[in-house]
Image: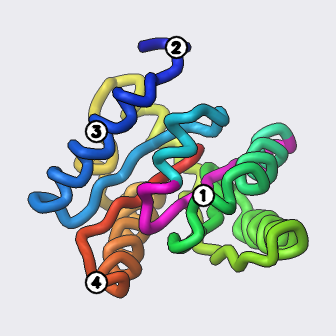
Amino acid sequence: RGNQMATPLELSRLRHEFERLGRHADILVLDAGNTLTPALTEFWRMANLVLTMTTSQPLALMGTYALIKALHTEALDSTLVALVNQSSDDDLAERITDKIQEATHRFSGRQIEAWPGIPFDPAVREWDEARRPWWLTARLDPAALALEQLAERCLAVLAEVGTNGRALACA
């Protein structure tokens, strides 16, 4: 619906459909973006696992801080995770997730896990421009391998919850 906000009825229907889908899927991942909306708030409430993804760009990092600060109380029973996307420097990515962990604990008292991110990989742009699903066909590229490891880790965490899970990725 573009920039229009979802109505409460639409959000209720969406929640119902996600719950029905859960009987048929091990995991449901939503790329929910990072714009604070009623829909994003509802997604945080529904998720068993919330992945907050950022890049090393200062504006993206500030957006991640703001999103966690605004919504951390909406996912009280969820595992919160921070990871860095498109980083060409593992040390920088680790410093960024450390900062997110420290800030989250300072303003909310909540723990947020730091997971390895998805490295910068020029193959992603090539596959994207070709409109091909790079994560399915470029299995040995660094980003594809990292995405596969991320999916396996999500499944492991959700299995610990003991239910079919819903993971939410906030870019």
**SS label for mark 3:** loop
The circle on residue 162 is 4
Q: Earlier in the sequence, mark 1 or mark 4?
A: 1
Give the amino acid type for the residue marked by disc 3 in the picture: Pro
Q: Position of residue 47 (x, y in %)?
A: 43, 60
* Part of the protein shown in magenta: 45-58
Instruction: Give the residue at mark 1.
Output: 74
Q: Residue at left 46%, top 23%?
A: 6
In the rendered structure, are the residues bearing label 2 and label 4 in contact, judged by CB atoms less than 8 Å apart? no
The circle on residue 4 is 2
Give the amino acid type for the residue marked by disc 4 in the picture: Gly
Q: CA distance from mark 2 to mark 4?
A: 35 Å
- Please identify, in this view, whether the residue under mark 3 or under mark 2 is nearer the observer: 2
Near mark 1 (Cα within 10 A), the count class, few <14, some 14-19 or many ≥20, is: some
Give the amino acid type for the residue marked by disc 2 in the picture: Gln
Q: CA distance from mark 1 to mark 4?
A: 20 Å
- Which residue appears farthest toward the bottom when viewing the image? 160
Q: Earlier in the sequence, mark 3 or mark 2?
A: 2
Q: CA distance from mark 1 to mark 3?
A: 33 Å
- Please identify, in this view, whether the residue under mark 1 or under mark 4 is nearer the observer: 1
Relative vertical location of residue 1 with respect to residue 150 in this rendering, above or below: above
**SS label for mark 4:** loop
- The image quadrant of residue 163 is bottom left
Instruction: Give the residue at mark 3.
Output: 133
- Magenta includes 135? no
